[in-house]
Amino acid sequence: MKFKSVILTLSLLAGLSFLVSGQDSSFEAKDELAKYGNDSIECVKNLSLYRGSYKQWKQAGYKGESLVDAHKYWRNVLHDCPKATENIYVDGVKMTNYRIKKTKDASAKKSLIDTLMMLYDMRIHYFPLHYKTKKPQVGAILGRKGVDYYKLDPAKNYLKTYEILGEAIKLDKNRAKGPVYIYYFRSVTKMAQKGDTDTAAVVDAYDMISDYIDSNIEYYIKKGNKKKEEEYNNIKGNIENTFEPFANCTDLVRIYKKKYDANPEDIGLLKKITKLLDKKDCLDSQLYFDAIVALYKLEPSPESAYLIGKMLLIDQKYNEAVPYLEEAIKMENETRAYKALIFLAEDFSSLKQNVKARNVALKAAKLNPKAGKPYAIIGDLYASTASSCGNDELTKKVAYWAAVDKYKKAKAVESDLAESMNKRIASYRKYFPPTELLFFHNLNEGDSYTVECWINEVTTVRAAK
């Protein structure tokens, strides 16, 4: 077996020089060739032979000597009829990557890596459109090229990777594959570590990439695709971990304070500053507040109103926050509009405007039916006003029934809230009327009961436990 392995390696290396010398960066010179080259019969024959051997190699788990025959006929197709089929490049990348892993000789490995990069370039040149959809696929191919290049030698290839994947992201934006974002960001951070760029470039890259990742997460949440949602959340976690050493508020404020002072009316810059500092929870900086106020003055919008309202809420300026949050709920982004509704409900709650707080919380529940937080807010409203909503020993306790109903609803809708809701339920159950008080008022457990006052809600009679 060892002898066969040596023969296999030698056979592959023997064909390497032919491929590299015969099919270099001047492949564009063959643009005039017909799809099946000058000798279509020979091309089709080689194509059939290479595909047959390649399938055998694939069926054997990408092991065995079928690769030798596949490679021999494949390189003839690549040389004589490079436009025959896109499979030439898909299969060629697989075979070349395999050979790179198996090759120990440094010179041969370098030639193979050159061949791999050339195959990606040829695929872009001859097949810039997807064969089924006819949509541009240059960005996707560049993405695969850059990821492969980085993996081959991260210590040496990070600069070129940055260029390749930067172009891929420029073309595909939020449609790029997850690994493209990951390895692009790794190349940027490595550049910063090696002194090839500064921290500001890392922050800018993070800002761009995290936007694209968040848009994918939101898209797959709407689609109900849990698998893809989890995939992009994992990608986000990877990016966040890589960014962590560059993500402290002191550095972020230092970097963007200089930019802000130089261009305090640059709307694009203001949006970047507010979004990034908000995301990294740097809300106590003067820069954050100055930027959101400046942004609102220059371009009043629900988005900038949201940021100001949130800031005022944190500062416990509840009355001042209301008009901004009321504007913020008009945001088109449903995720952020939901958050604005939650903040507004909490704001009204702090102002003791209970009916308004409940109405806003119900709007939040309607906008995001999978969220339990709105019901938790309503439950807290009921519990906090229970004693003031009655005029005797019984009626001062009945609102706790309605509060527990909402806590149960919250955890039923969003299972992640089960632990916190169970604690609330256990805490307020002991405030239920005792059995003897129910008996005195001619009430039985399980009866329907309407809680009056501002609550005005039907619930079920229960005794304290």
Image (cartoon, helix red, strand yellow):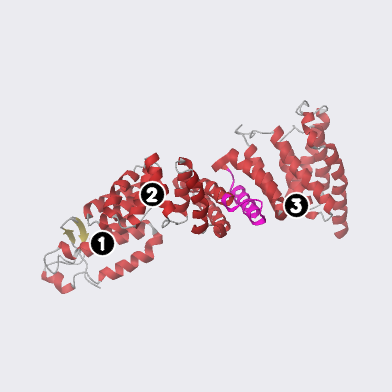
> What x and y, as percent, mark residue 106?
83, 53
Q: Main secondary structure of the magenta part?
A: helix
- First-in-chain label (2 vs 1): 2
- First-in-chain label (2 vs 3): 3
How far apart in space, not on screen, are marks 3 and 1 (Cα)?
Answer: 63 Å
Which residue appears at 84% of the width and 51% of the height? 107
Vertical order, 403 against 464 (above or below):
above
- Which class describes the residues within 10 Å of circle 2: few (<14), some (14-19), or many (20+)? many
Q: Are marks 2 and 3 in contact (CB under 8 Å)?
A: no
Vertical order, 133 against 202 (above or below):
above
Where does the magenta region start and end? Answer: 176-200
- Which class describes the residues within 10 Å of circle 1: few (<14), some (14-19), or many (20+)? many
With 273 as the anchor, is 53 left or right in this view? right
Is 388 inside the magenta-drawn segment? no
> What x and y, as percent, mark residue 348?
26, 54
- In the picture of the structure, the residue carrying the numbered disc 3 is 60
| Quarter of the figure with residue 380 | bottom left
Q: Is residue 62 visible?
A: yes
- In the picture of the structure, the residue carrying the numbered disc 2 is 307
- First-in-chain label (3 vs 1): 3
- In the picture of the structure, the residue carrying the numbered disc 1 is 403
Q: Amino acid at mark 2?
A: Leu
Q: Secondary structure at mark 2?
A: helix
Which residue appears at 69% of the width and 36% of the height? 124
Q: Quadrant of the C terminus?
A: bottom left
Q: Amino acid at mark 1?
A: Ala
Q: Amino acid at mark 3?
A: Ala
With 1 as the anchor, is 51 left or right in this view? left
Q: Secondary structure at mark 1?
A: helix
How far apart in space, not on screen, are marks 2 and 3 (Cα)?
Answer: 58 Å
